[in-house]
């Protein structure tokens, strides 16, 4: 087990390096003088000169990459010219908000998706199955940002149940109940698409598993049907559901960008969009690398979970 | 193609999707000639007109522009961008995939590692990075979305191309002296086109959504030009005061994406043959029963199967897998049920406890009486409490019949605890004892093993231990030794025989092997084409088979040390049970068959020794 985790961690290193190479190459395609692109067109010549030296922008591309990588490894992501603060500080400030939002949505979509998928498979062609299938099709097709806007109209404006936007109330907020009230709508809106995808996949995986011989064995033993479905079958189906959870985590993280815009959530996604519109290149670069690295880390967790579940992987 | 379209439209949702998408596409194409307001003509006096206002069917936006007109033009733009992105991603991905798959080796390795790297990004990060470099704009958003989706296509198409690259016709083309380019273009590409088309049809909806998303963020189309996403993005600031400006483009995106998805699913389902046959139906907790008449009890006995009929209803076809089969089993007796594959012996056995997969299985008649209680149509809860406690099963292949992810100990403990409310530790002790009873060495340690860690013989011992867990009266063993090699087979048979004698078990032993029957069974029933053709004491049947089929089945068993002998395989194949011949089902393969054999029902005749034949062996 420990060995498996270690090999998995080591195998992430080339992926992380690959990510830095890709991001670096994309950023190197910026037309014009990179220092001007980074500092904006009003930069003083001294600043441009200093930046050129610091990032090795006069050097060949491969050296620039290693200078940049070395800086990254020391936690130096550069300075955001628009915010005038270190990129890493800004990312870390923003990332916790994104983590709360995306994490909640991920838990929601996993739980609801698997639940709906199992019920749907257990009642195949029944009323519940048809209803779930219909909702799933709708859920997969609705743009999350549009859904978020409609939720604001209904729950915040019409019914006044929940706050319109933000993460905390400006006055008298800041505690956990306040956070939950602000979190409910964005997390729900963000989880809908992934819930649909996971429900659909779980249904298929369950149908596949329910035809297996070991399910018949469980029934022949006299195991109650509820346990056959939620124990034996789901346990086996999880083997094909878990990798999809890993993929969906990426989609939840992506969707968070839209949802953060709609609900004015102070996360990394909104930071990135603002940075692009302001052409704050270092902030975009750092944010992309940071979030991608976190995603790789999350996928290691998923793989380890998979190996805990399936003893055949470990050996 | 006709079949494909019929299948597609039989799926009502896909048909609905096709119609909605068709209408939207036609309207989008016709937009320039429709009598609409100019989409970008501002009129600030008429800001935020509600829908159904004079001259503005859907109202106006924050600059007083006609929403209907903007919607149509925006739809046109969104569709075009989505299709274009799918096309670019599809073509580029296909090119990369074909190269990697065709050349293989290092090209493949390097390319696919690159693709893996790209897939390690949450997709939008990559898109954002690309837009950050190229600057906001619709064309750049299109490029970003296309690039982000290239890895998906590349990976899919590489998989298909690898398969094609190793086919004979590629080698033939190479030997004929064709160059790589020509082979790829003339031999490989035509074969992957369908895959590309399917992949595109399932992702177009997604691409439309993504480009709309980038536009929504303000990174796609720039004012005054507007696709659906940027319409929604611009309307967001007026969401509360003029919700219709958001709802109109939002609903349109929803409609487009939903119809594309429905259609894409329909296309995929129509092309996936597994779904066509309905093979993905899940078996229910107990076999469906549609019984018209319940036969009266014909006698006493531990287990009496009476005129049992089990059928499979697949589409318009009915397979009569079990046709009026009657068997009885006395306490402590071992009854062999023998026949070729497809003769209905396993279905008979599974019908006893309602374990025939349903759908498609249906029990259409007969009764199964356990100590006088009819199990067919019994409530699920009754059936469940009897399963494993009174009647236990041992199945054929213990690798697929044991749960692969549970330790064998847990599976045993579960079997005990479903029927008896004992503590976990008590059940654990009993499980160890059970493993020792089936002679698994080092049971206390083995109990923590997973099925894949055991050998085939050991796994089957676990299967037997599980069947014994609740001290059942009857064990139904469905070819328990077929998947094992011969020495292990002998051990398992000896074990079963021992257990039967020491515990007074009644065994219904299903096999296709007369050699096994001879070792173990007191009586034998021979099945053919879903019916019993002969029954009687094992020794009698082995020494003097009465049915020609039995005789030939026995002749198929090779004898060790019996010298050279012609092994007489039975010519022909067992009958298809959806199309049984009139009269004797074996007649087409029987060397003694006469015209009379092919007419009308032939009854099972005799009492202790029964045979269903007009011209039994040994008769004058």
Image (spheres, coloured by chain):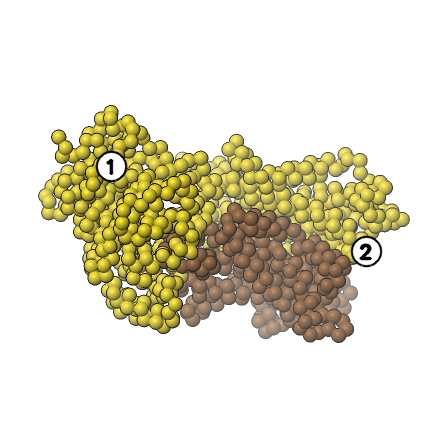
Chain colours: A brown, B yellow
How many numbered circles are shown?
Answer: 2
Q: Which mark is residue B343?
A: none
Are labels 2 and 1 on one chain? Answer: yes
**Which residue is drawn at the image coordinates 32% and 49% (left, top)?**
B369
Looking at the image, can residue B19 be seen?
Answer: yes
Which residue is identified by label 2?
Answer: B241
**Which residue is drawn at the image coordinates 59% and 41% (left, top)?**
B13
Q: Chain of mark 2?
A: B
Looking at the image, can residue B167 be seen?
Answer: no
Image side of residue B513 versus residue A109, left or right:
left
Q: Quadrant of residue B264?
A: top right
Q: Position of residue A264 (x, y in %)?
A: 72, 63
Q: Which mark is residue B604?
A: 1
Front in this rendered view, residue B227 or A132: A132
Circle 1 SS class? loop
**Which residue is drawn at the image coordinates 31% and 45% (left, top)?**
B297
């Amino acid at each position: 087990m420990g060995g498996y985790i270690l090999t998995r961690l080591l195998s992430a290193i080339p992926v992380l390096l690959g990510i830095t190479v890709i991001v670096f190459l994309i950023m190197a395609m910026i037309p014009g003088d990179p220092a001007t692109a980074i500092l904006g067109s009003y930069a003083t010549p001294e600043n441009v000169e200093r930046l050129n030296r610091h990032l090795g922008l006069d050097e060949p591309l491969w050296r620039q990459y290693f200078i940049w990588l070395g800086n990254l490894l020391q936690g130096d992501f550069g300075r955001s010219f628009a915010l005038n603060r270190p990129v890493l500080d800004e990312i870390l400030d923003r990332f916790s908000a994104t983590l709360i939002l995306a994490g909640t949505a991920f838990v929601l979509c996993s739980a609801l998706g698997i639940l709906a998928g199992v019920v749907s498979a257990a009642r195949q062609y029944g009323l519940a199955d048809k209803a779930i299938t219909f909702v799933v099709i709708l859920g997969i097709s609705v743009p999350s940002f549009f859904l978020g806007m409609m939720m604001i109209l209904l729950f915040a404006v019409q019914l006044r149940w929940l706050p319109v936007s933000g993460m905390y109330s400006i006055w008298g907020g800041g505690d956990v109940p306040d956070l939950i009230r602000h979190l409910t709508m964005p997390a729900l809106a963000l989880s809908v698409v992934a819930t649909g995808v996971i429900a659909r996949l779980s249904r298929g995986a369950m149908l596949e598993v329910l035809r297996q011989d070991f399910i018949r064995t469980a029934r022949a033993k006299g195991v109650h049907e509820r346990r056959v479905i939620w124990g034996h079958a789901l346990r086996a189906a999880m083997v094909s559901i878990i990798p999809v959870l890993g993929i969906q985590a990426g989609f939840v993280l992506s969707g968070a960008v839209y949802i953060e815009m709609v609900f004015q959530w102070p996360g990394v996604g909104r930071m990135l969009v603002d940075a692009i519109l302001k052409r704050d290149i270092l902030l975009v670069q750092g944010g992309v690398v940071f979030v991608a690295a976190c995603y790789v880390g999350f996928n290691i967790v998923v793989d380890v979970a998979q190996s805990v579940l399936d003893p055949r992987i470990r050996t | 193609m006709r079949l494909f379209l019929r299948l597609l439209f039989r799926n009502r949702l896909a048909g609905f999707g096709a119609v909605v998408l068709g209408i939207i596409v036609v309207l989008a194409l016709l937009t320039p000639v429709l009598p609409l307001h100019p989409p970008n003509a501002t009129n600030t006096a008429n800001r935020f007109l509600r829908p159904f206002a004079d001259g503005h069917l859907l109202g106006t936006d924050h600059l007083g522009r006609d929403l209907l007109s903007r919607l149509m033009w925006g739809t046109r733009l969104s569709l075009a961008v989505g299709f274009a992105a799918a096309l670019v991603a599809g073509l580029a991905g296909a090119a990369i995939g074909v190269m990697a798959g065709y050349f293989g080796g290092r090209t493949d390795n390097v390319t696919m590692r690159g693709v893996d790297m790209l897939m390690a990004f949450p997709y939008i990060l990559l898109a954002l990075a690309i837009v950050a470099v190229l600057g906001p704009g619709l064309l750049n958003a299109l490029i970003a979305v296309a690039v982000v989706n290239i890895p998906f296509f590349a990976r899919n198409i590489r998989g298909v191309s690898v398969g094609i690259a190793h086919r004979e016709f590629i080698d033939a083309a190479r030997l004929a002296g064709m160059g790589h380019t020509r082979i790829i273009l003339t031999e490989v590409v035509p074969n992957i086109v369908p895959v590309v088309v399917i992949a595109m049809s399932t992702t177009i909806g997604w691409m439309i959504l993504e480009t709309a998303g980038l536009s929504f963020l303000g990174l796609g189309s720039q004012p005054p030009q507007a696709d659906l996403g940027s319409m929604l993005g611009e309307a967001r600031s007026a969401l509360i005061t003029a919700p219709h400006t958001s709802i109109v483009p939002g609903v349109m995106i929803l409609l487009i994406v939903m119809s594309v998805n429905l259609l894409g699913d329909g296309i995929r389902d129509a092309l996936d043959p597994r779904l066509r046959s309905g093979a993905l139906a899940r078996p229910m907790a107990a076999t469906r029963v549609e019984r018209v008449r319940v036969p009266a009890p014909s006698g006493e006995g531990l287990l009496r199967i009476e005129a049992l009929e089990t059928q499979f209803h697949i589409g318009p076809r009915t397979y009569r897998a079990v046709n009026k089969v009657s068997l009885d089993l006395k306490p402590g007796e071992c009854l062999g049920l023998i026949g070729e594959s497809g003769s209905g012996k396993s279905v008979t056995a599974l019908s006893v406890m309602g374990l025939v997969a349903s759908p498609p299985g249906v029990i259409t008649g007969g009764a199964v009486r356990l100590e006088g209680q009819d199990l067919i149509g019994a409530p699920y809860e009754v059936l469940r409490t009897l399963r494993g406690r009174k009647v236990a099963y041992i199945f054929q292949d213990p690798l697929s019949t044991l749960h692969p992810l549970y330790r064998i100990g847990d599976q045993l403990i579960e079997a005990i605890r479903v029927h008896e409310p004992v503590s976990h530790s008590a059940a654990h002790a009993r499980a160890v004892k059970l493993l020792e009873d089936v002679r698994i060495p080092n049971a206390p340690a083995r109990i923590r093993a997973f099925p894949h860690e055991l050998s085939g013989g050991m796994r089957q011992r676990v299967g037997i231990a599980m069947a014994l867990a609740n001290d059942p009266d009857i064990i139904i063993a469905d070819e328990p030794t077929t998947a094992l090699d011969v020495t292990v087979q002998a051990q398992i048979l000896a074990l079963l025989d021992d257990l039967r004698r020491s515990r007074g078990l009644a065994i219904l032993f299903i096999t296709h092997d007369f050699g096994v029957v001879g070792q173990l069974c007191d009586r034998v029933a021979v099945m053919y084409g879903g019916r019993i053709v002969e029954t009687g004491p094992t020794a009698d049947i082995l020494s003097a088979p009465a049915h020609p089929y039995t005789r030939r089945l026995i002749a198929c068993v090779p004898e060790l040390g019996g010298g050279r002998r012609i092994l007489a395989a039975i010519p022909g194949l067992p009958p298809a049970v959806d199309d049984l011949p009139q009269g004797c089902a074996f007649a087409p393969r029987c060397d003694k068959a006469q015209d009379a054999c092919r007419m009308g029902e032939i009854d099972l005749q005799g009492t202790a020794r029964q045979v269903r034949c007009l011209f039994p062996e040994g008769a004058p």
